[in-house]
Amino acid sequence: MKRIGTSSNKESVFKNEDMKNSQYENCNLENTEYYQVNLKNSSFVGSNIRNMNMSNCNVSQSKFRNINFRSSSYADLNLSGSKFSLVILGGVQFKDTSLGENKYPISFNRCDLEGSTISSSNLKNMEIENCDIAGMKVNSIPMEKLLALYNKVKS
């Protein structure tokens, strides 16, 4: 990412300034850039930060509520221990993801994943409990047929 060139660097560039505890309200900060700044405990409320680009940033323990992340891109992230509630995931794709070095399991509770596909993935020791599996297929075989065959062999 390149730094923005300005018409007058003296007026537009702030370096080594202590601006903590400042408040900005109804300000136009369009096309501004922040390099090596400390925004710890900062808040953005009712703000338009569309097309924002964040790289090499620590946002651990941050909270995002009622946020429109539509068509955003996430790559090379560590989301370990994160919680997602009341999230709309239509059209979202997960590729080349893992449970990390410690293999902490992921869980889905009360999720509507109808019509979704899991392919070329490691599902060892995965459990599906108390779920509506109508129409679900494993390697193109309907789950109802697999369970019927299992129950027939089991009895």
Image (cartoon, grey):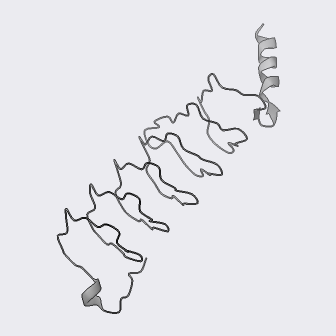
- Tell me which residue sits at (47%, 49%) in the image: 66
User: In front here: 30 or 106?
Assistant: 30
The spot of residue 112 in percent (x, y) is 64, 36
Number of on-image labels: 0
The spot of residue 7 in percent (x, y) is 35, 92
The spot of residue 18 in percent (x, y) is 17, 70
Which quadrant of the figure contains the C terminus?
top right
Left or right position of 108 against 113: left
Q: Residue furthest bottom?
A: 7
The answer to whether residue 5 is above or below residue 76 is below
The answer to whether residue 135 is above or below residue 38 is above
- Tell me which residue sits at (69%, 44%) in the image: 119
Please tell me in which quadrant of the rendered image residue 102 appears.
Answer: top left
Q: Residue furthest top?
A: 155
- Tell me which residue sits at (68%, 45%) in the image: 120
The answer to whether residue 122 is above or below residue 60 is above
Which quadrant of the figure contains the N terminus?
bottom left
The spot of residue 136 in percent (x, y) is 75, 32
Please tell me in which quadrant of the rendered image residue 30 appears.
Answer: bottom left
